Image (tube, helix red, strand yellow):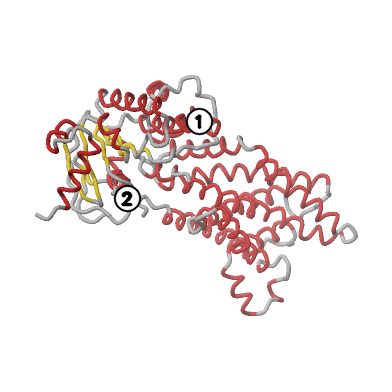
Amino acid sequence: MLRGISLDVTAGKVTGLLGPSGSGKTTLLRALVGVQQAVSGELSLLGAPAGSPGLRSRVAYMTQSPSVYADLTVRENLRYFARVLGAAPAQIDAAIETVALGGHEEQTVVSLSGGERARVSLAIALLNEPELLALDEPTVGLDPVLRRDLWATFHTIAEGGSTLLVSSHVMDEADRCDELILLREGEVLATGTPAALRLQTGAEDLDQAFLDLIDRAEAPA
Amino acid sequence: MSPRVTMATALRVLTQLRRDPRTIGLLIGVPTVLVVLLHELFADRPRVFQSIGGPILGLFPFVSMFIVTSITMLRERVSGTLERLMTMPLAKLDLLLGYGLAFALVAAVQASVVSAVAFGALGLDVERSPVGVVALAIGNATLGMALGLFVSAFARTEFQAVQFMPAFVFPQMLLCGLFVPRDEMARWLQFISDALPLTYSYDALRRVTAAPELGSRFALDLAVTLGATFVALALGAVTLRRRTP
């Protein structure tokens, strides 16, 4: 359940969508890519209504659990989605390189580790060089090294000109984002760069900053 | 609609199937064994095998493809790949036709192998060319596939999807005229039988294999089988929602 949301996400930046479980992160991302039912009111992005056919080749979405065909190899998965997207075959190798899955191309997804599967799913989202890339908790359940590598990958992708919207419920990932959107119970609590949020609350720790913002929002006016 | 996406989907489905040799073995082996069993069962009454053998050959693909498609499509829904495809420039019809093409090809292989055994080793003899039986078998497979795609939308788990087989397929098998000739059924059962697509595809098979004349009813049989396939595909497309809760 989301109410009256309006957001500015800067192009070519990594924006973190943070909030506790159930705050509406997945719903917001699904609404943006046009697969969420019962969206009332107007929702538009990149100058077109969310989910309109023209956007389908400009936006990419990576679901929370890897949406790939487990019985196909990495390359077969990418080849299929590349054909659906009309992406050039060269994009397949480029995407494999970006997510550092070289050497695993001929392995079936079912034989890969959880982190590798997540990266196959990410590679698919990169195939059509999307203008907006919506990633739903892409680092959940991954070890610290992989998480660091993936965040580095996100910034590499953003430098290529794509805009990334990455959701997470882990506040310590907030510092890895260029900009933040804090979501709580379906409402935007705060937006801004990590530094600005620190300044606003006077808290050194972003976790604490988030808690301060919640307290302020709940304090009687 | 784009032939590129349709073909890519068909190829992808076939590649997935190729990764699962046991399923291919079961798809081809089980009906072959069943036809042999049927032949042995009526060893002392060869006329029974001659009269029901042909139609049965054409009905196997209907059942197999119904099950295989409903499970495959359910997996696509559960794994999130369907949702991902729905965010991409893919027409629903591309997906459905891709599945259709892939499974029609599998059905053709299945029907050809089982027919080769029946017409060759088991000495099944039909009134007309065995090619007609294989062609109708592919048609039935497509019908089974379309129905399977449609009902998969109503299953949340694979257990439920498997239960749709007895729910949707058995009544059609019982009432199509294979077990009891339709004119010997109670009136109300005949009405139900009239409303079920398999009744018409069974009748077409019976005419190709046994009847001295195809008759004008044959054209109706083909039209209803084809029409039911398209209606089920259209209903399947309606159940493929871009937006889900």
Q: Nearer the viewer, mark 2 or mark 1?
A: 2
* Residue A52 visible: no
| Residue displayed at 53% across by 46% down | B100
In the rendered view, tell whether residue A30 sits above or below residue A113: below
Please give the chain letter of the residue carrying mark 2: A
Identify the secondary structure beneath mark 2: loop
The residue closer to the viewer here, A80 or B44, is A80
Circle 2 residues within 10 Å: few <14, some 14–19, many ≥20: some
Corner quadrant of residue B112: top right
Question: Residue A57 location in percent, x, y?
Answer: 31, 36
Distance between the alpha carbons at the discs numbered 2 and 1 = 27 Å
| Residue displayed at 73% across by 53% down | B128
Q: Which residue is mark 2?
A: A22
Q: Which residue is mark 1?
A: A113
Corner quadrant of residue A46: top left
Please give the chain letter of the residue carrying mark 1: A
Question: Residue B233 location in percent, x, y?
Answer: 48, 54
Q: Considering the image in quadrants, where does the C terminus of chain A appear? A: bottom left
In primary-sequence order, the first of circles 2 and 1 is: 2
Q: Name the kind of residue labelled 2 in the image.
A: Gly
Question: Residue A175 location in percent, x, y?
Answer: 25, 30
| Residue displayed at 52% across by 39% down | B10
